[in-house]
Amino acid sequence: MAKQGTPRVLVAKVGLDGHDRGAKLVARALCDAGMEVIYTGIRQSPEMVAEAALQEDVDIVGLSILSGAHLELFPRALDELKKRGLEDIIVIAGGIIPEGDYPALRQMGVKEIFGPGTPTHEIVDFIRKSLAERESGR
C-alpha cells in the first residue's frame, strides 16, 4: 500500500446492484483529487473485492450498495480482507444505507458511511484525514 504519496482507492459495487452512477461519480471525483482509483464494476462478490484489494495494493476500499444487502455483504467483505491479511485497509461505504444501520456497520469495521447526495469533497477530505491518521499511528 502507498504509505506515502498518492492514495490508492478501490471502488466496488458489491452484490447484485446494477446501478453504478453514484460509484462512478465518486471514483471520478477521487481521480480528480489526485488519487489512483481502481473501479471494479458492478456485481462484485466480497471475495472478488478482497482479491482486487490485495492485487491492487490499495489503501482504501469503498463499498457501494443500493440493494439493502449491506448487513450481509459488508461483513463478508471485511472477513475476506482479514483472511488476506488486509486489516489495515480503511473501508468506507456509500449508497442507500439506513442511518439506523450505521452503528452496526461501524462496529464491524466500516470507518465511515456516505449517503446519497454527500458532497464528493467530504469523501476526499475524509480519505486524506484517515490516511494521515493511519500513517501517524493514531
Image: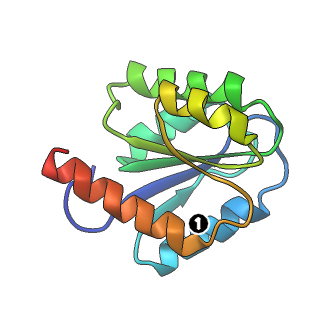
Q: Secondary structure at mark 1?
A: helix
Quarter holding the C terminus is top left
- Judging by the rendered image, the residue that carries numbered circle 1 is 27
- In terms of image quadrants, where is residue 125? bottom left
In the figure, 92 relative to 79: above or below?
below
In the figure, 108 relative to 125: above or below?
above
Q: Residue at x 50, y 80 (%)?
A: 32
Q: How is the image coloured?
A: rainbow
Q: Position of residue 81 (x, y in %)?
A: 44, 28
Please state the total of marks drawn on the protein image. 1
Name of the residue lying farthest toward the left: 136
Q: Residue at x 62, y 37 (%)?
A: 102
Name of the residue lying farthest toward the bottom: 32
68 lies left or right of 136: right
**Looking at numbered disc 1 in the image, what kind of residue is underneath it?**
Ala
42 lies left or right of 31: right
- In terms of image quadrants, where is residue 88? top left
Q: Position of residue 16 (x, y in %)?
A: 82, 36
Which is nearer the eye, 97 or 100? Answer: 100
Q: Residue at x 70, y 32 (%)?
A: 70
Q: Position of residue 69 (x, y in %)?
A: 77, 30
- In terms of image quadrants, where is residue 29? bottom right
Q: Residue at x 37, y 40 (%)?
A: 89
Q: Residues within 10 Å of mark 1 (few under 14, many from 20)?
A: many
Q: Position of residue 47 (x, y in %)?
A: 57, 27
